[in-house]
Image: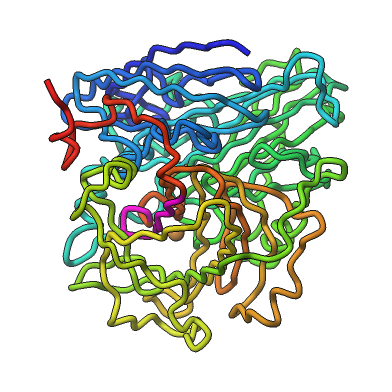
Amino acid sequence: ARDRKFTWEISYQHKSLDCYKKLAVAINGLTPGPTISAEQGDRIIVNVTNNLFMENVAIHWHGIRQRGTPWSDGTDGVSQCAIMPGETYTYEFVVDRAGTFMYHSHYGLQREAGLYGLITVSLPVGVSEPFSYDFDREIILSDWYHNTTYETATDLASIPFLWVGEPQSLLINGRGNYSCSGLAASVCNSTNPECLPSNLTVISGKTYRLRIASLTSLSALSFQIEDHEMTVVEADGHYVEPFVVNNLYIYSGETYSVLVTANQNSSRNYWTTINVVSRQPNTPNGIAIFNYDPIDYQKLPPTNPPPGPLWNDTKSQVNQSRAIKARQGFIVTPPKKPDRVIVLLNTQNTIDGYVRWSLNNVSHTLPSTPLLIAIKENMTGVFDPNPPPDDNDSANYDIYSVANNTNSVSSSSIYRLQFNSTVDIILQNANTMTANVSESHPWHLHGHDFWVLGYGEGKFNLSRDTETYNLADPIMKNTVPLHPYGWTALRFKADNPGVWLFHCHIEAHFFLGMLVVFESGVEQVGDIPLSNYGCGQTKSFIKP
Ligand code: C2O
Ligand code: CU
């Protein structure tokens, strides 16, 4: 194991990722940012300097559990005081498991301004994967808005509520294609090389491992390569019992590895496409070129891009979620029974006229003093000490009707989990405030991986549905979809001392309260670096 050091400067840059020029948050001038490649056991040291003139930064290492370094989790309001303009902060953590992960901003809506990238961790020398391939390739999927994050945040937090709507573009490796028609070339230039379709060049007969990560702010996607089947082998850093798909559904915060063999007609190129699913789309499909060497990578395929699956084919989305199982020989079996069951009913409602998302009628807010420091230092008055409910009569809630949760409140309360206990989470979906609409929500847990025990349609029933759990070969993940009008059941062991977010990875939903906080074993957390202090009540701890 060795140390890998990175020096990053965060700044706003004019970018034309989809041909339309706008300001993006970049790392060393790049969005997506540079990939962090490391080997299992390495220590990653990232020196981050904030050169945004008017905005803080915090960077989260999504999928890295931060065992022993909960202060490096990079979450504003939870693990650290965000990095102020002009300041430098050093993240330091060990990548203890091989696989495909990601990093992104965890400050306001900053992720969707472009601050994200991949982390790939290889096995130690001498250890090999349980599948073979010739080459490794990276694919970052994202969606792109022309509004600034300032406009979007203001609109979300206003009365009347203003929804930003569907993204203008979908990006593959940071490239999209917005129609510039009617716009001045200084604003939108369709011949700008920054927005040429990205290409994946392959050699006929070779097999590629595509490491695919979704960093969308909103969209659930389907990814496919025209005429090429893909074998799913990894999900969120865990081996998957291989299965073959024509299209891969991928939700924000998820990573997959698929194997694809360049076994089609090598005298032409093929389309790689992404399209929006789960929400009625209003965004053109994203395209890239699957390019057979030595054909010119800009030569468009002779066919029309495949349209992708129907956006509202929920059945096939749920079926693919269910097909993801742990690979034989690599199964980690979950504890047989939980010590605690938390049912989180996901609803949309208004609180004092503001549109919010709630869990069990609580819309969560994060304090200005990081919770990890507040708990470790026994501060009072930072968060509401009354715990939020483990269930709120979800059994009697009508998930098919328009939400009318007049008792919803905003709160900074947190769930305190007994250290080393086994916790089940049942995510229960419901109708939004719009008739006949239930959205999908990708839920992500910091600091841990969980077992995915099952997905169901309709309302969860504790005595009936726990019998259907997959305890034999459940996949472990850190992000999982909650499908429309359905439920998703998870189990995890609260064995990582710290304070951890569990939230919807749709950035606007998180912003509107769709999160909970888990505390466990903070008394075991070592000394938190003083550089995490400086905001809220932590100011008084900084002695000259
Ligand atoms: Cu990738 Cu808390 O998020
Ligand atoms: Cu959501």
- Using the rendered view, name the quadrant where residue 369 is placed: top left
Quarter containing the C terminus: top left
Residue 475 appears at what percent x and percent y? Answer: 72, 50
Q: Is residue 533 left or right of residue 307?
A: left
Residue at the image position 16 percent from the left and 30 percent from the top: 54
Comparing 58 with 484, the one in front is: 58
Reply yes or no: does residue 512 show up in magenta.
Answer: yes
Question: Who is closer to the viewer here, 155 or 146?
Answer: 155
The image quadrant where one finds ligand 2 is bottom left
Is 299 placed left or right of 25 in the picture? Answer: right
Q: How many marks?
A: 0
Q: Quadrant of residue 337?
A: bottom right
Chain part drawn in magenta? 510-520
x then y, percent, for residue 350: 27, 73
Quadrant containing the N terminus is top right
Please name the residue shown 37% across and 76% down the image.
433
